[in-house]
Amino acid sequence: MKLLPILIILAGVTTGVAGGLAYEIMRVNYPKLHSEYEIFYLVETHLKRDTSEPEELPEVEFLAFNDPFIIPVIEEDALKALISLKIGMEVLPKDKSKLEHYKPKLRDLFLQIMFQHSHAGAFSGNYSESERLIALRRNLIQVVEGNLDIS
């Protein structure tokens, strides 16, 4: 009976050491990604990419909206919160001037998508979950591709 507490302590210490070693191996071999966009990009390219040929990424420029997007979060017929989002887009250099011209239309389309996102309850609770943000990002990309002729 006196041996049981020693075995429990020994098992706990062994588990802690093994967990620490596993963490260190993972930290060194798989460095932390710096943004959710990188995770989204890696998942999307891994699913679509043919591994037989290395893929070169095109050079991109950033198109930023000067003013933030303000989205109300309404629950039980009352204003629960206001979400303020600052959005920037990666665009090809040849498309940047065309998209600058469409900024007002893009802003309107983005607001429509974000209001729908809010109405569906996606901005309630932990709205920064990756699944919610990936869905929002995918909808924003689709609305740009479906409504603007940038080819």
Image (tube, grey):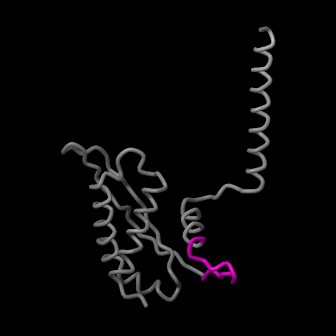
Q: In this view, does 112 lie above or below 29?
A: below
Q: Is residue 13 above or below residue 99?
A: above
Q: In this view, does 139 lie above or below 130?
A: below
Q: In which quarter of the image is residue 29?
A: bottom right
Q: Residue 27: horizontal and vertical position, in percent? A: 74, 50
Q: Which residue occupies 35% across, 61% down? A: 69
Q: In which quarter of the image is the N terminus?
A: top right
Q: Residue 62: horizontal and vertical position, in percent? A: 51, 75
- Looking at the picture, tell me which residue is in the foreground, 106 or 16: 16
Q: Which residue occupies 75% across, 32% down? A: 16
Q: Residue 7: horizontal and vertical position, in percent? A: 79, 20
Q: Is the magenta stretch mostly helix, strand or loop?
A: loop
Q: Residue 115: horizontal and vertical position, in percent? A: 28, 60
Segment tinted magenta in the rendering? 46-58
Q: Is residue 19 above or below residue 143?
A: above
| Extreme residue in the bottom direction | 151
Left or right: 3 as drawn, with respect to 100: right
Left or right: 94 as drawn, with respect to 6: left
Residue 54 covered by magenta stretch: yes
Q: Which residue occupies 36% across, 77% down? A: 103
Q: Which residue occupies 31% across, 51% down? A: 121
